[in-house]
Image (cartoon, rainbow, N blue to C red):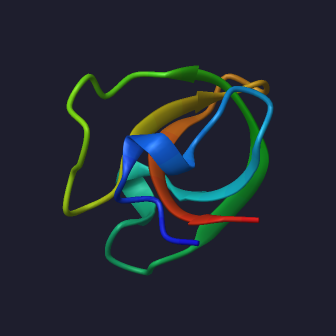
Amino acid sequence: MTGTKRSNIKIGSAVLVVQKQDQRTGKLTEGIVKRILTNSAEHHHGIKVMLESGIVGRVKEVK
């Protein structure tokens, strides 16, 4: 499932995110959603979330 729709993402979901510094390389980081930071229903680059580890990034894939 893609991470462009807020309705696909729930707190506690396992996701793959791309961090700001990794956008050029496309390196993905796996984690569990702690907070959803994007207020809009959709975002073309992915919904911004904070993982339980404190990492902030845009969701590329919901597991």
The part of the image, by quadrant, that contains residue 4 is bottom left
The part of the image, by quadrant, that contains residue 12 is top right
The mark tally for this picture is 0
The part of the image, by quadrant, that contains residue 11 is top right
| Residue under the point 46% across and 59% down | 3
Q: Residue most toward the bottom?
A: 25
Q: Residue most toward the front?
A: 7
Please give left or right for residue 1 compared with residue 15 in the image.
left
From the viewer's side, name the closer residue of 19 and 8. Answer: 8
From the viewer's side, name the closer residue of 19 and 59. Answer: 59
Please give left or right for residue 30 compared with residue 38 in the image.
right
Please give left or right for residue 38 compared with residue 6 in the image.
left
Query: Where's residue 7, x and y in %?
Result: 46, 42
| Residue under the point 21% across and 51% down | 43
Q: Is residue 52 above or below residue 60?
A: above
| Residue under the point 25% across and 38% down | 41
Query: Where's residue 9, x and y in %?
Result: 57, 43
Q: Quadrant of the N terminus?
A: bottom right
Please give left or right for residue 30 compared with residue 1 in the image.
right
Q: Quadrant of the C terminus?
A: bottom right
Q: Is residue 38 above or below residue 43?
A: above
| Residue under the point 31% across and 28% down | 38
Query: Where's residue 30, x and y in %?
Result: 76, 57
From the viewer's side, name the closer residue of 27 and 10. Answer: 10
